[in-house]
Image: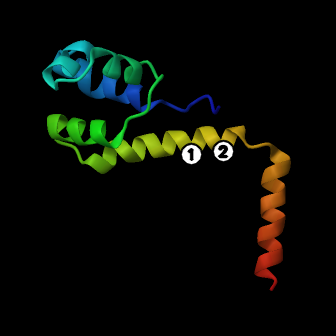
Amino acid sequence: MPRDLIHPGEILLEEFIKPYGLTPSSLAARLGLAANRMKTIVNGERSISPETAILLAEVFGTSREFWLNLQAHYDLEQATAAIPAERMEQARTLHRELEAV
């Protein structure tokens, strides 16, 4: 995994939860969610689901897409780092072959 890759939960915690004097547990409670949902998100152990993205957007005045895009970017970077170089080269070779058609 790339070193500078930041989980969306860390952004949620540092840029939204803490500045408002909240905790993951208090935010979850105010939204009627299980406390472990927010805890596992901010600990980088859980993804931000569409439902959570909608709720976070309502609470913090962002868009739903903001949260889902953070998650998608994180997921894509993780997946890219996990693909062996040989497989990436195979895909690039096939791309070049298809362009030549």
Q: In this image, 60 relative to 73: left or right?
A: left
- Using the image, determine if residue 98 lies above or below residue 12: below
Residue at 49 percent across and 30 percent down: it is 6
Residue at 39 percent across and 27 percent down: it is 9
Q: In this image, 84 relative to 40: left or right?
A: right
SS assignment at label 2: helix
Please rate how many residues cluster around mark 2, counting C-alpha atoms within 10 Å: few if below 14, some from 14 to 19, many from 20: some
Classify the position of the C terminus by image quarter: bottom right
Kind of residue at badge 1: Leu
**Residue 78 locus on image (x, y percent):** 60, 37
Residue at 76 percent across and 79 percent down: it is 99
Q: Quadrant of residue 38?
A: top left
Kind of residue at badge 2: Thr
**Residue 74 locus on image (x, y percent):** 51, 39
Q: Which residue is mark 1?
A: 76
SS assignment at label 1: helix
Q: CA distance from mark 1 to mark 2?
A: 6 Å
Classify the position of the N terminus by image quarter: top right
Labelled disc at residue 31? none
**Residue 46 locus on image (x, y percent):** 44, 27
Q: Which residue is mark 2?
A: 80
Q: Quadrant of residue 31?
A: top left
Question: Is label 1 in contact with label 2 (beta carbons under 8 Å)?
Answer: yes
Report the front residue among 54 and 18. Answer: 54
**Residue 32 locus on image (x, y percent):** 17, 23
What color scheme is it?
rainbow
Residue at 74 percent across and 43 percent down: it is 83
Please rate how many residues cluster around mark 1, counting C-alpha atoms within 10 Å: few if below 14, some from 14 to 19, many from 20: few
